[in-house]
Image (spheres, grey):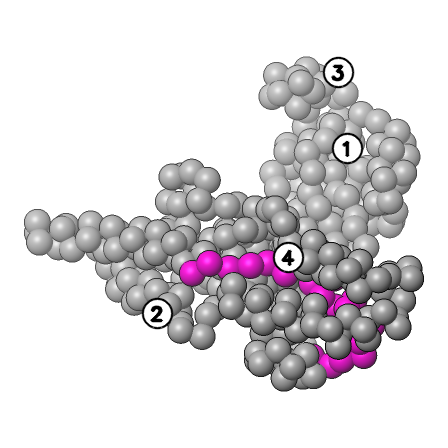
Amino acid sequence: MSKVKINENVFKSIRGELGLTQKDIAIACNIGIKTVHNIENGLSVTNTTFSKIKEFLVSADILEELQKTGLLWEPSMQDLYDYISDNLEQKGDTEKHISIQSPFTILDIQASVITKVSQAEYDPGIYDPYLINEDKDKRFSNIHEEDYINMRKQAEDTSLSPSNLKKLQDACLEKNVIWKHSAYFGSDSEELNTLRKLSKIIESAKLNIDKEATSLNSLTESIEKENAFFECYSELQSQGLNIFLGWQVLNSGPVPIIFIVDKDIKKLEYSVKELHPRLHLLPTDMPFYSLREYPGKTFELQSKIFNGITKDFERVKKEGITTFITDAENLWIEACQNIIEEDLGGHKDFMLMANEMGYLG
């Protein structure tokens, strides 16, 4: 099914200038209110829906109304027509950012922190480099709710390589998995029928995930299920959908996040609440990473050598994004520097090791 990505910013600004509600424009264009909501949240629509919207917005009555607003500076009817025609459709590959409200985070926090109900102390025995004033053998910490932070990540496009597609298949079979859709599903439900078929294949495969084939017949059944999985995936691609794969790292283990998006999405970032990286990265890896903070207390883990903290701070700050502005994140720097001295033989040996691992190239 052919789809069109409407520029939601242009669409919302025109609707705002006209003083129309989502319901008003849905009735005027003879489309569903949910479709209008989806458009303003970045979802694609069918060519038929796009034609209805464009026909309404470039009608003589609407262009006359727009002339009275501040959409363009003293526009003619032709100016407005050209503006809408040229800008209503989002051209080229698009990017998307999705925030995940994961139920597994809540479950993990409940299982990890000390609860008033049970009065039981949860001791995961995780090495915590923040405890820099403690002896090494005492740097083990209980997990608390404040140890969970919003991490900003980039999902993998599963269509780019066979290895990514195999990762997707394995992720679908995980016990804990999050499915998130951010795509347009047509009223004829072709895509939904394909997803139902895919769901049955996944559930059937889960029943036999740990079983070895005891006959040639059971082996061929397993191969057929795998082939059916890839056929469904190809079918979704032909229907204008794509699948991205992300992960949420919790104390209980990694949880896959599977995103179903429109095919024109070429880059997908997401933010998800999970354990602070200090509690799931190896101590010897920590000096190679820093945290960049985005608005809204969302952090991104990035590969960077800790050999110029002040310089890095000033450079990143000029880009409009601040790094290490809290006392907690300054502790991250101090903890990593401590690891360099105690575990990696000091700054000189650390730099040699970093060079050998390709971090300085």
Mark 4 and mark 2: Cα distance apart in space: 28 Å
Q: Report which residue position mark 2 lands on.
A: 193
Q: Which residues are magenta?
A: 1-22
Q: Residue at x 77, y 33 (%)?
A: 338
**Badge 4: how crowded within 10 Å, few (<14), some, or many (20+)?**
some
Q: Residue at x 63, y 84 (%)?
A: 27
Whether residue 96 is visible, yes or no, is: yes
The secondary structure type at the circle numbered 4 is loop
Mark sitting earlier along the chain (2/3): 2
Q: Report which residue position mark 1 lands on.
A: 338
Q: Find residue 89 and name its label.
A: 4
**Badge 3: how crowded within 10 Å, few (<14), some, or many (20+)?**
few
Mark sitting earlier along the chain (3/1): 1
The secondary structure type at the circle numbered 1 is helix
How many circles with numbers are drawn on the protein?
A: 4
Mark sitting earlier along the chain (4/2): 4
Foreground disc of the pair 1, 4: 4
Picture coordinates of residue 98, whole percent (x, y): 63, 59
Picture coordinates of residue 147, whole percent (x, y): 71, 57
Q: Residue at x 69, y 38 (%)?
A: 302
Kind of residue indicated by mark 1: Asn
* Horizontal relation, residue 256 to residue 25: left or right: left
Picture coordinates of residue 124, whole percent (x, y): 58, 55
**Cβ–Cβ below 8 Å for labels 2 and 1?**
no
The secondary structure type at the circle numbered 3 is helix
Mark 3 and mark 1: Cα distance apart in space: 14 Å
